[in-house]
Amino acid sequence: MIKTGGRRTRAQQGRGRRSKNDEPSGEGGRDEAAALIAEAAAELAGLARRHNFDMLYFLLGMARLEAEEHLRLRSKRNLS
């Protein structure tokens, strides 16, 4: 019988949470993910522009800029 409602136990509350620094096993780090996202977004933005998907072009451009900004700020922090 499954009990519905009620409060979650302390063990259940923390389950599935990771800190920002935790890396999924088998995947690259945050910087590698940001670089991949920037590259993919740039390619997809080009495709969107060629086919006159103006809003997609804009949004993919913003995604690319956000990923590049992460990389820029990360490298700036590593220099200091």
Image (cartoon, rainbow, N blue to C red):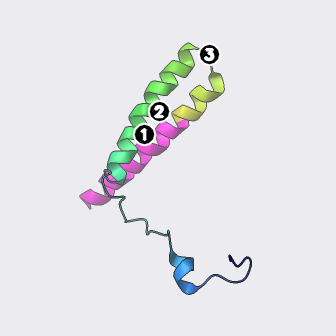
Dots 2, 1 in contact, CB < 8 A: yes
Residue at x 57%, y 78% (from the top left corner): 13
Q: Earlier in the sequence, mark 2 or mark 3?
A: 2
- Sort mark 2 into few (<14), some (14-19) or many (20+) by Cα contacts within 10 Å: many
Residue 32 in the image, given as x and y percentages of width and height: 32, 46
Q: Is residue 51 left or right of residue 24?
A: right
Q: Amino acid at mark 2?
A: Ala
Estimate the x, y position of residue 60 in percent, counting from the top left.
54, 33
Asked if labels 3 and 2 touch by Cβ distance under 8 angstroms, the answer is: no
Q: Amino acid at mark 3?
A: Asn
Query: Which of the numbered marks, if any, corresponds to residue 41?
Result: 2
Q: Which residues are magenta?
A: 62-80
The quadrant of the image that shows the N terminus is bottom right
CB atoms at circles 1 and 3 under 8 Å apart?
no
When the figure is inspected, residue 10 is found, relative to residue 37, above or below; the finding is below
Local crowd at mark 1 within 10 Å, few (<14), some, or many (≥20)? some
Q: Residue 73, relative to residue 36: is it above or below?
A: below
Q: Hey, which residue is sitting farthest left in the picture?
A: 79
Q: Return the residue at label 3.
A: 52
Residue 74, relative to residue 12: is it above or below? above
Q: Which residue is mark 1?
A: 37
Asked whether 2 falls inside the magenta stretch, the response is: no
Question: Which x, y percent locates residue 45?
Answer: 51, 26
